[in-house]
C-alpha cells in the first residue's frame, strides 16, 4: 500500500526529517567543540603567564589556555579607546566609550591590555587574543620608535569582558539542538516503520479508511496529476506534503477559490506584486499556493469549467460569511451544484 504516490510523499518527507536529525546532531557537536576551550578554561581557572610564556606563544588562536592572569608594572593608558557611536537616520545621537587600551610592562616586554574605561591596574585577568590590526597601525605610528615596537608583544589581553559569558548562549543552543536531534530521529524512525503515523495519513484518515483512500489516490496519480509549486492535483484531491506543512483537500469539498494579490514595497517604493491561488473547503481548510499569475489564472479557469458551482473571486463580504457562517456558505454552493447538475 505504501509503494505508490502517497508512499513516495511519506518516504521523501521522512528522509528530509532524517537529514534534519543528522544536521542538528552535527550542529550540536560543532557548538560543543566551539565552546570546549572556553569550558575547559572556566573549569581550570585562569593560567598564570609571565613574559617568557607570553613571548613563546605561536598564536593566541591555537593556545588552549587562552584565559589568563598577567601581572606587570608601570601600567599606562595608550589614550586609544573603543567608542560606540549610535546614529538615527544618519544623525549622530550619542557616543559611548566601551573600552580603553592600556600598556603594561611584563618583564622586559610591553603587553597591551584592553580594559573597561579607566581601569588601570597592575594585574589583569582576561582572554589572550591577537593584537588588532587597527590598534597596531595607530599605536605604532604614535610610538615612532622601532625598539618600543619590537618590545611590544604581538598579542593582547582582553580584560574588558567577563570570560565565559558566551558559554550561556552555547549551553542554551546545545540544550535546544540535542532534544531537537532526538525528537526528529524518533519521529523519522517511527514514520519510516509505521507510515500511517505520518501527518499526511492523519489528514487523509479524516475522509475515511486509509486502506481505501490511499489506493484511490495512487490510482488517480498514475492516471493523471499536475503540480503547482509543490502542490499536487489529481482528479479528486489537492495534496500538499512537505516537512513543515501538510494539507489534503478533497476537490468535492472546495467551495471558494480566488486569486490573491500581494503588493510589496520598501520605504513606500513599490517593488513588485506576488500572486497566490487560495482554495477553501467546507471543512475550513485552506490551501494557499504562490505561483505566476498566468498559472493561477489557468487553474481557476480549469476549476470553473469542472466545478462551476464553486464561488470564485474575493470580497470582504464573502470572507465574513465564510468565517462566521461556513455551513451556510457550503449550503449555498451545494444548492448551486444541485441546480446546475439538474439543469444539464
Image (cartoon, rainbow, N blue to C red):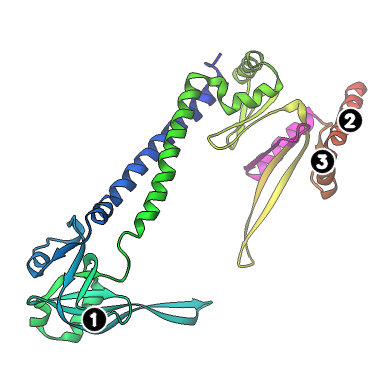
**Residue 295 colored in magenta in the image:** yes
Residue of label 3: 322
Residue of label 1: 138
In the rendered image, the vertical position of residue 107 relative to residue 62, given as above or below: below
**Residue 105 colored in magenta in the image:** no
To which quarter of the image does residue 221 belong?
Answer: top right
Numbered-mark total: 3
Q: Residue at x 15, y 70 (%)?
A: 154
Crowding near the residue tagged with mark 3, few <14, some 14–19, many ≥20 C-alpha atoms within 10 Å: many
Observer-nearest of 208 and 341:
208
Left or right? Give the position of 337 relative to 209.
right
Residue of label 2: 336
Residue bounds of the magenta highlight: 280-307
Crowding near the residue tagged with mark 2, few <14, some 14–19, many ≥20 C-alpha atoms within 10 Å: some
Split into 4 quadrants, where in the image is the N terminus? top right
Observer-nearest of 279 and 43:
43
Amino acid at each position: 500500500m505504501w509503494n505508490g504516490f502517497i508512499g513516495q510523499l511519506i518516504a521523501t518527507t521522512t528522509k528530509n526529517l532524517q537529514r534534519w536529525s543528522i544536521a542538528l546532531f552535527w550542529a550540536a557537536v560543532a557548538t560543543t567543540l566551539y565552546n570546549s576551550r572556553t569550558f575547559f578554561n572556566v573549569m581550570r581557572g585562569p593560567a598564570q603567564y609571565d613574559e617568557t610564556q607570553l613571548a613563546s606563544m605561536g598564536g593566541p588562536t591555537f593556545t588552549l589556555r587562552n584565559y589568563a592572569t598577567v601581572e606587570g608594572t608601570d601600567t599606562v593608558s595608550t589614550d586609544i579607546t573603543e567608542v560606540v557611536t549610535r546614529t538615527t537616520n544618519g544623525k549622530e545621537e550619542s557616543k559611548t566609550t566601551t573600552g580603553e587600551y592600556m600598556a603594561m610592562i611584563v618583564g622586559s616586554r610591553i603587553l597591551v591590555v584592553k580594559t573597561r574605561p579607566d581601569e588601570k591596574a597592575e594585574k589583569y585577568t582576561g582572554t589572550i587574543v591577537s593584537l588588532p590590526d587597527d590598534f597596531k597601525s595607530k599605536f605604532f605610528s604614535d610610538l615612532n620608535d622601532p625598539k618600543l615596537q619590537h618590545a611590544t608583544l604581538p598579542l593582547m589581553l582582553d580584560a574588558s569582558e567577563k570570560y565565559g559569558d558566551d558559554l550561556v548562549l552555547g549551553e542554551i543552543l546545545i540544550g535546544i539542538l540535542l532534544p531537537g536531534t532526538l525528537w526528529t530521529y524518533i519521529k523519522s524512525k517511527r514514520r519510516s516503520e509505521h507510515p500511517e503515523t505520518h501527518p499526511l495519513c492523519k489528514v487523509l484518515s479524516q475522509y475515511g479508511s486509509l486502506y481505501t483512500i490511499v489506493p484511490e489516490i495512487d490510482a488517480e496519480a498514475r492516471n493523471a496529476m499536475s503540480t503547482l509549486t509543490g502542490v499536487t492535483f489529481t482528479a479528486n484531491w489537492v495534496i500538499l506534503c512537505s516537512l513543515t506543512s501538510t494539507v489534503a483537500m478533497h476537490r468535492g469539498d472546495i467551495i471558494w477559490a480566488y486569486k490573491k494579490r500581494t503588493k510589496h514595497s520598501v520605504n513606500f517604493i513599490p517593488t513588485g506584486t506576488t500572486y497566490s491561488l487560495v482554495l477553501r473547503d467546507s471543512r475550513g481548510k485552506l490551501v494557499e499556493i504562490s505561483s505566476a499569475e498566468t498559472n493561477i489564472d489557468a487553474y481557476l479557469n480549469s476549476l470553473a469549467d469542472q466545478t462551476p458551482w464553486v464561488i470564485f473571486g474575493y470580497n470582504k463580504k464573502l470572507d465574513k460569511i465564510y468565517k462566521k457562517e461556513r455551513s451556510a456558505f457550503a449550503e449555498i454552493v451545494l444548492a448551486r451544484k444541485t441546480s446546475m447538475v439538474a439543469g444539464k
